[in-house]
Amino acid sequence: MSDKTKIEWTDATWNVINGCTLVDDGCKNCYAATLAGTRLKNHPSREGLTKRNAAGGYQFNGQVRFIESELTKPLHWRKPRMVFVCAHGDLFHEDVPDEWIDRVFAVMAGNQRHTFQCLSKRPERMRAYLSDTETVASIAALVYLARH
């Protein structure tokens, strides 16, 4: 969504897929769900993706959404940068079709001036997908683990 971010370990975010489902206790304080339920709740890309939790905060409701208008944004960024892919979702969510992932990877493969950071809480799906895909050196696939 943005070619600039305040996230200290990356330069930009690319929210081509939004929405998620709770995986573990680390999801209880998800910053992306909080943003989608508050500041971004009326934005067409986030509207209807969250619900209130028992503590009064926000969590994603399990829906995922592909944002077509975001797909080609990295193609227009001239300056090389670290790009956090799907900062407001999980590229490897069980309801994200392989076709969506293929389209995201096609853009990343054609943009080797950037380094793409794909974080996921779904290592099994990531491993299965990447084992069937020719990966590119500029894509960092990382698994996020929460401490309990």
Image (cartoon, rainbow, N blue to C red):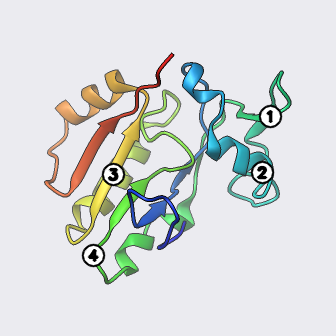
Image quadrant assignment for residue 75: bottom left
User: Of the residues shown, which amino acid type is indicated by label 2?
Assistant: Glu
Sequence order check, earlier mark of 3 and 1: 1
User: Of the residues shown, which amino acid type is indicated by label 3?
Assistant: Gln
- Alpha carbon separation for disc pair 3 and 4: 13 Å
Badge 1 crowding class, 10 Å Cα cut-off, few under 14, some 14 to 19, many 20 or more, is some
- Alpha carbon separation for disc pair 1 and 4: 36 Å
Q: Element at badge 1?
A: loop
Q: Position of residue 18 (x, y in %)?
A: 59, 47
Q: Which residue is mark 4?
A: 80
**Does the residue at mark 1 contact the one at mark 4 (Cβ under 8 Å)?**
no
Seen from the viewer's position, the closer of residues 21 and 34 is 34
Q: Element at badge 3?
A: strand
Seen from the viewer's position, the closer of residues 76 and 2 is 2
User: Of the residues shown, which amino acid type is indicated by label 4?
Assistant: Pro
Seen from the viewer's position, the closer of residues 101 and 27 is 27
Q: Is residue 131 left or right of residue 54?
A: left
User: Of the residues shown, which amino acid type is indicated by label 1?
Assistant: Gly
Q: Which residue is mark 1?
A: 57
Badge 4 crowding class, 10 Å Cα cut-off, few under 14, some 14 to 19, many 20 or more, is few
Q: Element at badge 4?
A: loop
Sequence order check, earlier mark of 1 and 2: 2
Q: Is residue 79 left or right of residue 25?
A: left
Residue found 76% across the figure and 61% down from its top: 43
Sequence order check, earlier mark of 2 and 4: 2
Q: Which residue is mark 2?
A: 47
Residue found 23% across the figure and 52% down from its top: 139
